[in-house]
């Protein structure tokens, strides 16, 4: 769970609404534009926990992608509902990722809290995110790019808010993000074939 709009006000970001049919295509194209052509392996780190409805966005995305991992040619997925990447194991998971993948290009995915008018927004950003900031956890920055989903309102009793977030909005946002990453994988495969 993060609060990027406070921590990284100068970062390049684009916002999309989860219920817009074009969102998955717009996210995929945005990420494709931001990923350098001379990239190393692209690792998607889905951060969160299945113990909190609001904070389960990342692991849901990871599970949806992992279920179709045989169809992915360019993305390596870490963080699922069964094997989440969360506050207690994030540093160890990052070490393991860097051992398995030489200089990986990381796309970090996490839920976040924001204004009531922003609930349902999916934010793509260039640069790292700081997970755990919304609930005052001090975790390492992660990612060359990030995707954050605003799942609920910030400002008061964040843990309680996360526990009482509607599962339907989290699941629908996760489906959009997972679909956009599958589209990104397809776009990256097209570039590989052209070379």
Image: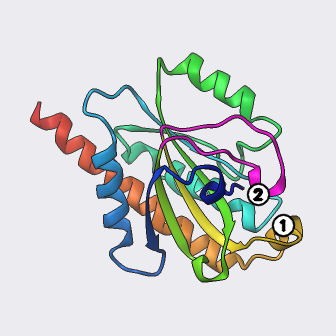
Q: Secondary structure at mark 2?
A: helix
Q: Describe residue 84's horizontal placement relative to residue 51 as left or right.
A: left
Q: Is residue 51 above or below residue 8?
A: below
Q: Is residue 80 left or right of residue 42?
A: right
The foreground one among 135 and 79 is 135
Residue most extreme to the left: 194
Residue 9 in the image, given as x and y percentages of width and height: 55, 54
Contact (CB < 8 A) between labels 2 and 1? yes
Label 2 vs label 1: CA separation? 7 Å
In the picture, the disc for residue 158 is 1
Say whether residue 2 is visible: yes
Residue 113 horizontal/vertical position (percent): 69, 67
User: Residue 134: which numbered mark, if any?
Assistant: 2
Q: Is residue 133 magenta?
A: yes
Q: What residue appears at the point 43 percent right and 71 percent down from the top-left corner?
A: 16
Sort mark 2 into few (<14), some (14-19) or many (20+) by Cα contacts within 10 Å: many
Numbered badge on residue 112 = none
Callout 1 secondary element? helix
Q: Would residue 63 be found to the left or right of residue 156 on screen?
A: left
Q: Is residue 49 visible?
A: no
Q: Is residue 180 above or below residue 33?
A: below
Is residue 106 placed above or below 56 in the rendered structure?
above
First along the sequence among labels 2 and 1: 2
Vertical order, 69 against 173 (above or below): above
* Magenta stretch bounds: 127-144
Report the magenta stretch's main SS: loop
């Amino acid at each position: 769970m993060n609060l990027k709009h406070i921590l990284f006000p100068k970062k390049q970001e684009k916002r999309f609404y989860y219920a817009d049919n074009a969102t998955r295509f717009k996210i995929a194209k945005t990420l494709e534009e931001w990923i350098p052509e001379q990239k190393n392996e692209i690792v998607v780190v889905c951060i969160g926990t299945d113990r909190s409805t609001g904070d389960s966005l990342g692991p849901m995305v990871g599970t949806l992608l992992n279920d179709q991992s045989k169809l992915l040619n360019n993305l390596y997925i870490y963080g699922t509902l069964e094997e989440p990447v969360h506050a207690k194991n994030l540093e160890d998971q990052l070490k393991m990722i860097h051992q398995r993948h030489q200089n990986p290009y990381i796309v970090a995915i996490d839920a976040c809290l924001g204004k009531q008018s922003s609930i349902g927004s999916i934010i793509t950003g260039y640069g790292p995110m700081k997970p755990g900031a919304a609930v005052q956890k001090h975790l390492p920055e992660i990612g060359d790019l990030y995707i954050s989903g605003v799942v609920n309102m910030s400002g008061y009793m964040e843990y309680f808010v996360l526990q009482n977030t509607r599962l339907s909005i989290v699941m629908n946002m996760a489906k959009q993000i997972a679909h956009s990453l599958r589209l990104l994988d397809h776009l990256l495969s097209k570039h590989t074939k052209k070379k």
